[in-house]
Image (tube, grey):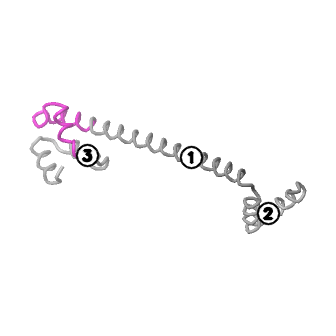
Amino acid sequence: MHAGVTEELEEIAMKDEKLQQAFRSWTQLSQTPDEWLAYESRLKQVLDEEAAKRETELAIEESYERGQHKQDVYVTARLLNDKFPEGFPTVAGAQEYLQGVTSSETLDELRKIVVRVNTWAEAKQTLESKSL
């Protein structure tokens, strides 16, 4: 293809979306089978790299969230153990009690309850009524 014609078409195409699409199609159709194979190979590589990058980002985010949740459970367990050792004689026991709590919001609510109540009996009653 003539370089001048291609450049002129590119300039026109940049100003019109329909022409941009037509130019892309024309460029693809004018490729030889080897060029097309090379293009598809490069495209696949780019898409694979982007997918791998996104998977890594998601794994990091998930790892952070798991770590944050473990920290929230530990802090709540320490609070339970410190304030109500008669109900939770060990931090490990409090952590075991919290094993089924998967929501940060529930842990926040639980910490508010622990701070608000004054006795283990009151805490136990409140926790049982909320099914925590």
In the picture, the disc for residue 13 is 2
Q: Which image quadrant: the N terminus? A: bottom right
Mark 3–mark 1 Cα distance, whole angstroms, equals 43 Å
Which is closer to the viewer, label 3 or label 1? 1
Q: Are marks 1 and 2 in contact (CB under 8 Å)?
A: no
Residue at the image position 19 percent from the left and 32 percent from the top: 92
Mark 3–mark 2 Cα distance, whole angstroms, equals 62 Å
Q: Are marks 3 and 1 in contact (CB under 8 Å)?
A: no
Amino acid bearing label 3: Lys
Q: Is residue 89 above or below residue 43?
A: above
Rendering coords of residue 121 (x, y %): 9, 44
Residue lying furthest bottom: 18
Q: Which residue is mark 1?
A: 50
Nearer-N-terminus badge (3/2) = 2
In the picture, the disc for residue 10 is none
Mark 1–mark 2 Cα distance, whole angstroms, equals 27 Å
Amino acid bearing label 1: Glu
In the picture, the disc for residue 112 is 3
Amino acid bearing label 2: Ala
Question: Does residue 35 appear left or right of residue 90 in this picture?
Answer: right
Q: Is residue 130 magenta?
A: no
Residue at the image position 17 percent from the left and 41 percent from the top: 97
Rendering coords of residue 104 (x, y %): 31, 47
Q: Residues within 10 Å of mark 3 (few under 14, many from 20)?
A: few
Residue lying furthest front: 33
Q: Which residues are magenta?
A: 75-101
> In the structure shown, which secondary structural element does the residue marked by tag 2 occupy?
helix
